[in-house]
Image (cartoon, grey):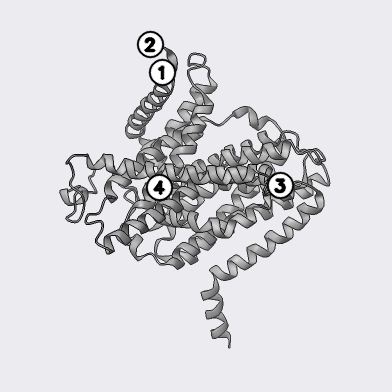
Amino acid sequence: MEFWNNSYWSSINQIAFLAVVLMISNVIRRKVGFLRKSLLPTAVLAGFIVLFIKVSNILPEGFFQVSFMEVITFHTLAIGFIALALKSLSNQKKASKMVAVESGLVIVGTYVIQAVVGLIITITLTLTFFPNLITGAGMLLPMGFGQGPGPAANMGSVYETNVINPFIGGKAFGLSIASLGFVWACVGGVLYLNYLVKKKKLEVEDELVVTEVVTSHVVEEADEIPLSEAIDKFTVQICLVLIVYFTTFFFMKGFDYIILTGAFGDFGIESMRPLIWGFNFIWATLFALLFKRIFAKLRDMNIMQRRYPNDYMLNRIAGTVFDFMIIASISAINIADLERLWIPFIILTTVGGVVTFIYIRFICKRVYPDYELEATISMFGMLTGTASTGVALLREVDPHFKTPAANNLVLGASSAIAFGFPLLMLVGLAYRSDQLAFITLGIVIVAFFVINIFLLRKRIFKRAVVTT
């Protein structure tokens, strides 16, 4: 076995490279005053440094592989969500099913308003000045902003290879939207945080002050497994996360097998398959919640005497993988993708970004009145970038996840699959013809009003009572 062969070291070297840049970025952020005060997450800074290095062609040819960065982003997103979902914090225990439902509807409501804005813009542009666009291309806005580079690239590729109504450059267009979504999440989110600091609505925590004391009970409570015995406790946490992810893989593989048998026809292969694999983090979260429920039942039946998941250690796993996910996802951006369809792209992403922020700020103020800021910044980060950017921004205002905002991302993403999956199926219909694009627009407009009537039902009912 030739251990000196580069193939043995390629993946490790790239991960080590990200680690080096992350540590350097941490030093830069701490030592440079305006960066420390800017609330720019260290991982985001590291991501843009790696992106600059990649564009500058400084690294040896073949050392940095964008495809491997996409792999890291794909898997760490799911692993981080599993770790958060396995936690049993008190605010998770107290979270009602209605909180999960409302969080899911906030997420789906944002997808829907992005779809409405996207379709209105692309229908208008296609029928006027840009006939090389397609009317259904607006559905790539919720895929790029709401889902991220992977699903946006998958669906853009489907649009591009459509025989009846092909969208030339569809994959690049989807990736471009996802790329600028990161800019909205990182730059826009940070600017908003700095605005709040300037208005004295947010205090910047001094990083030199220890705000959390780690004592023995945090990592070894009375009813938990010991910190170290035949197997290390941290090893157990990693095993639990990987077992859940392994189960998730077999579920997706089974679903994929059914699709490939032709059970859903061409629609299954062209539209459902990319969504099944693109939503790996949602399936992973659902299975993590299922495993947690099974653990609870086993303890109630006295079959399992000790608690295996540890909240503190699972937090550390989530924090670690999210840091690497942020770096990898930003560094995977292809600047060349922004060179095509500039005017539609700029109009679509600008209007989409502004509308997304206004809607999330409006709805979070009413759905999460006790932690409006944390909910707004985390939801905005997730629904313009990915869950990783949402968590990165959240950690600037809630570094120890003391509010339920992080849990809402997890629980919301889980329940969003039930509400949003039928609507996301429309992504596979809108591009097929102008008529289907108009039908899809009508459906998402109706869905938007239905979702928000439910979310604002208490206020609407209260006003109705007062009026009468």
Q: Nearer the viewer, mark 3 or mark 4?
A: 3
Residue position marked by numbered label 1 in the rendering: 8
- Which numbered disc flags the more N-terminal residue, 3 or 1? 1
Q: Which mark is residue 239?
A: none
Disc 2 marks which amino acid?
Answer: Trp
Q: How many marks?
A: 4
Q: Which mark is residue 4?
A: 2
Residue position marked by numbered label 4 in the rendering: 82
* Residue drawn 46% across the image and 33% down it: 72
Front-most of 381 and 147? 147
On the rendered structure, is 76 left or right of 148?
left
Helix, strand or loop for disc 4 = helix
Quarter of the image containing the N terminus?
top left
Residue 144 horizontal/vertical position (percent): 60, 43
Residue position marked by numbered label 3 in the rendering: 265
Disc 1 marks which amino acid?
Answer: Tyr
